[in-house]
Image (cartoon, rainbow, N blue to C red):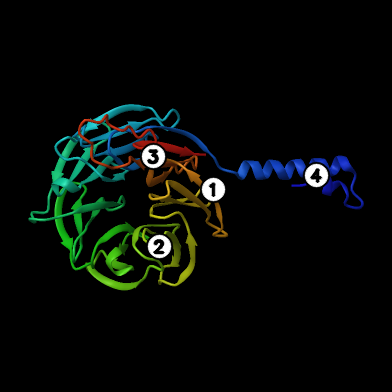
Amino acid sequence: MNVSKLKQLNGYPSKTLLLVSGLLLGSMTSSAQEVEKSSRAGTGVYEAVISKKDGHIYVTGAGSRTAPGGAIYKINPSSLAIVDSISLKDNPPFGIGINNKTQTAYTTNTRTNSVSAVDLKTGKVLATIVNGADKSHTREVLVDEVNNIVYVSDVGDPSSIWVIDGKTNKYLHSIENLGKTATGMSFLNGTDKIFLTVIGENAIYVVDTKSKQVEAKFASGGEGPVNITTDGERLFVANQKSGTVTVLDGQGTLLQSIPTGAGAIGIAYDAVKQRIYSANRQTGTTTVIDAKTLAVLGDFETGSHPNHVKVDPVSGAAFVINKTKGGKPVEGQPAVVDTNGDTITRLN
């Protein structure tokens, strides 16, 4: 805002103009976002959930070559300090979902083709769930809290979705034949339909949870659709290969394609501030998008490889989980420490 130009407008005293410009500048400043804090989040971090009951962030860590094992790290949302951890060393976790009503977290343990049910109140592992198949690749978790049903994407060719009873924490059955490399899942209105990203077909499958059939298919609007979320009316899709977020209605009509950083993978919607977040693994940035105008508000350097985003439903603060840089250790040389990886970053 150029105050000197405001002063030149006819008919307005300079004091009034300064007051108006100050209010406008204050409004602009209050709407701006910034990286507030970043901190270590564990080893081999991947995804996170936020408990509505205690407000803490629970981050999965699958360990590393030099520090094998696995855990769920409990992180204070204000200090970003690790305040506790739950060992999952026998089944290192990657993906995670939560039933906030029962305070049970469900992790996808890709290396052991299993799912862990963990009581966040006690830190106890309630069950290790398998589907009995020789091969599986458990990926993402979607929880129906109303009916206490847990859905887990199983990546393959074709892919499937596991259906788990949240009361007994037992595998019930799978919804089969869901395309090549299915990953992300979201509900839209109600829990009778799952919108599933299918990377190998650049498509979204609409899966009826009652009939266990694919009701519809439509293009994602980008290449490599890997994750998906919603505001209840529209679908927001992170397309990893094309580096875009696409916005579609529930029937698959493409409303907008928004360029982000390369390797868009994590996607989240903030109902408090009306914003969309895209974690872009290759560029090390997180893109913030106005959910009303679909304009890009900014790109923030949040860590080495931004992988996942969760938004606090009360405060609207966004938390980005950043993977560490890969690479095998070289014999005879000191290990390279990536200070910007294995971190959690808060955007206000």
Query: Which amino acid is tagged 2?
Result: Ser
Say which of marks 3 and 2 sits in front.
Answer: 2
Q: CA distance from mark 4 to mark 3?
A: 44 Å
* Mark closest to the chain's N terminus, 1 or 3: 3
Q: Nearer the viewer, residue 104 or 240?
A: 240
- The residue carrying pointer 3 sits among few (fewer than 14), some (14 to 19) or many (20 or more) residues within 10 Å by Cα, namely some
**Residue 230 position within the rendered picture, expressed as x and y whole percent measured from the top left:** 42, 58
Mark 3, residue position: 52
Say which of marks 1 and 3 sits in front.
Answer: 1
- The residue carrying pointer 1 sits among few (fewer than 14), some (14 to 19) or many (20 or more) residues within 10 Å by Cα, namely some
Mark 2, residue position: 242
Q: Nearer the viewer, residue 154 or 166?
A: 154
Query: Which amino acid is tagged 1?
Result: Lys
Q: CA distance from mark 4 to mark 2?
A: 41 Å
Asked if 241 appears above or below 126 in the picture, the reply is below
**Residue 135 position within the rendered picture, expressed as x and y whole percent measured from the top left:** 11, 56
Label pair 1/3, CB-CB below 8 angstroms:
no
Q: Nearer the viewer, residue 263 or 247?
A: 263
User: In the drawing, what numbered circle is on residue 273?
Assistant: 1
Say which of marks 4 and 3 sits in front.
Answer: 4
Mark 4, residue position: 3
User: With 183 as the anchor, is 137 left or right in this view?
Assistant: left
Q: CA distance from mark 2 to mark 1?
A: 26 Å
Query: Which amino acid is tagged 3?
Result: Lys
